[in-house]
Image (cartoon, rainbow, N blue to C red):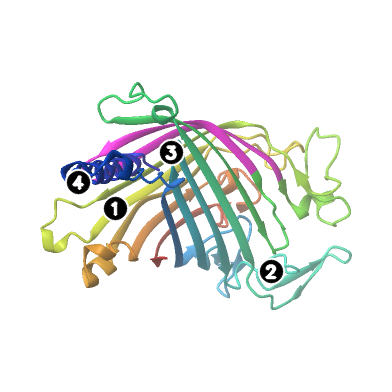
Amino acid sequence: MSFRRAMITAAMLAVAAFASTGLAGAADLPVKAAKKAADLPFFLVIDDRVTFSWMPKGTDPGVFSVRPNGSINGTTAKQVYSFTHFDLWQYGTNFFTISALKSDHNDPANPCTNAGVIFNPGTGIATPASCEGATEIYGLFRSTFSGNSIFNTKAFSYGPLHDISLEVGMDANTENNYLSPAKRDVVAGLQFAFDLPYKGYVDVAPLMYWEFHNRNAFTQCGGGFAGTIPYPNAGANCLTDGNRSFDPTWAVEVNYYMDLGFLPENMQFWSISGRAGWYGKKGYENNPLVGVNTAIELNSEPIRLTFDASKAVWGAKYSHFVDLWVAYRYWQNKFGIDHKTSGVCNVSPGVSNHTCTEETVYGGVTVKF
């Protein structure tokens, strides 16, 4: 998120107010007839969008199927429906997004425990099944509070550094597969906002990250699976309700955006953007149960190329009302699970099931309303 828009909006409003009072003076209106300048709205910018995207090679750790030739299929095609809100007010910004991710049959809904299989813990026998794909709901919220705006200063600007802000936020999800996750985390730290050419920006936020709750039905006592999972020196091999709690750790989140303003004027419909998030080790993968350690997680979309279709068809007045885009996504050690050592990611030592690293090219359409 950038405060460049805040400065542009404030400048435009100031110019408008100055022009209004200037015209009144030129007309020699009496003082008593001069109108009071309109108060600024609470939200200087409100931007709401909906997006549909299709991801041909998504993953879900531990979820895979075996092809007739014996090879492992660890990828899951996903349809993603998203709503995104961004607003700008006097002292900062708010960003919120919520997505529904619908998986294909390779990532099945409960009661399937893997693609096409229901495992009966009582008998230990797996029976064929035809379960629909799982549906995940994921929400993310971030707010920033501008140092320059709050203290009415330019002390937090230097060269390309535009501002330093306090950033807070949280994430939450739920999914109707057998794992039945329910992630809840909070973040807090600083955001450093830098300017890029062509109305661009890059924001870098070092944060504290705490995933204080996340469910895993496979660890729940009495579920039939927990007793088969080894937790050396744990003193227990299951969780009463399957709810895990991880250790606080560090995180770094980066976002950037830039118009391709160097293109000829009749081709200035393109922009690039991207993001990356690094999250530190947060304890054991089923914390507080002792077991395999988590790993540093990288969740990234290093580049997204966007075509401003509405501007190309209807002109600059409708810029970014309809965007078509394609992106590359790379997510290593998904959810912090170590893709090299975890039994979730490997069918046997050194033999990966290809589910803990997500790498895909995907695309979509975004509409502003």
Tell me the quarter of the picture where residue 255 sits.
top left
Q: Name the residue under label 3.
A: 90
Q: Nearer the viewer, mark 4 or mark 1?
A: 4
Q: Main secondary structure of the magenta part?
A: strand
Q: Name the residue under label 2.
A: 109
Q: Which of marks 1 and 2 is in front?
A: 1
User: Which element carries disc 3, helix, strand or loop?
Assistant: loop
Regarding residue 139, the answer to whether it shows in the image is: yes
Q: Do the residues labelled 4 and 1 touch (CB within 8 Å)?
A: no
Q: Are marks 3 and 4 in contact (CB under 8 Å)?
A: no
Query: Which residue occupies the foreground of this view, 35 or 129?
Result: 35
- Say which label, 1 or 2, has the lower sequence index: 2
The quarter of the image holding the C terminus is bottom left
Q: Where is residue 245 in the image (x, y as percent from the top left)?
A: 73, 39
Q: Is residue 364 one of those drawn in magenta? A: no
Q: Are marks 1 and 2 in contact (CB under 8 Å)?
A: no
x 43%, y 47%: residue: 41
Q: Name the residue under label 1.
A: 272
Q: Position of residue 209 (x, y in %)?
A: 58, 35
- Say which label, 4 or 2, has the lower sequence index: 4
The quarter of the image holding the N terminus is top left
State how far apart marks 2 and 3 are (Cα): 45 Å
Circle 4 Cα neighbour tier, 10 Å, few/some/many (<14 / 14–19 / ≥20): few
Q: In this view, does 21 lie above or below 191?
A: below
